[in-house]
Amino acid sequence: MGNREKMKEAGENILSMTIVMHSKFVNFHTISKTCEVPQSYIRVLFILKKFRAMTMSEMAKIMVISKPNLTPVIDRLIEDGYVERMPGPKDRRKLVISLTDQGRTYLEEVEEKVKDHTAGKLESLSAEDLDTLNEASGKIIEIIRKLK
């Protein structure tokens, strides 16, 4: 099998894995049912955790929504004390959003719920299957981090 075919097969496997993972484990809709804020708000918090701080345009691009649709989400998260909006360090005309300490604490609680939910799904696996899953998922993460 040539490299191109291997890449296509890997792409197909990743797509299948994403669909299965979404339906079996980490599903923002399911997570948001146990939270006090909608799933789009949870997505914003997770994105800000990863990227630390970003402009509204950058956030809208990642979420694949328009800035006008993102604004009420950010406004509500600011009102709830989870996010703050500040002038950009390089260009004060650009507003940068980031997590507050309260937002980080809330996100830690959400992550703990996700971990508990996931652990509950894994209870039916044998110790051998858990070892294999841990090893394989660790390897997948390691490889994906190499992507540009």
Image (spheres, rainbow, N blue to C red):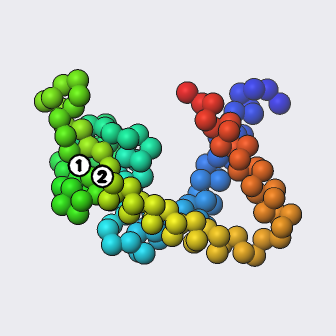
Number of marks present in the image shown = 2
**Where 12 falls versus 79 (above or below)?**
above
Whole-percent x and y of residue 17? 65, 53
Residue 108 as seen in the image, left or right of residue 8: left
Q: Residues within 10 Å of mark 2 (few under 14, many from 20)?
A: some
Q: Is residue 81 left or right of residue 42?
A: left
* Mark 1, residue position: 84
Q: What is the number of the mark on residue 97?
A: none
What amino acid type is highlighted by mark number 1?
Glu
Residue ID at (79%, 26%): 2
Mark 2 and mark 1 in contact? Answer it, CB < 8 Å: yes
Which residue is the site of mark 2? 100
* Residue 69 visible here: no
Q: Residue at x 33, y 54 (%)?
A: 101
Residue type at tag 2? Thr
Q: Counting residues from the N terminus, which is met first, the one under dot 2 or under dot 1?
A: 1
* Foreground pick, 15 / 104: 104
Residue closer to the observer: 49 or 18 = 49
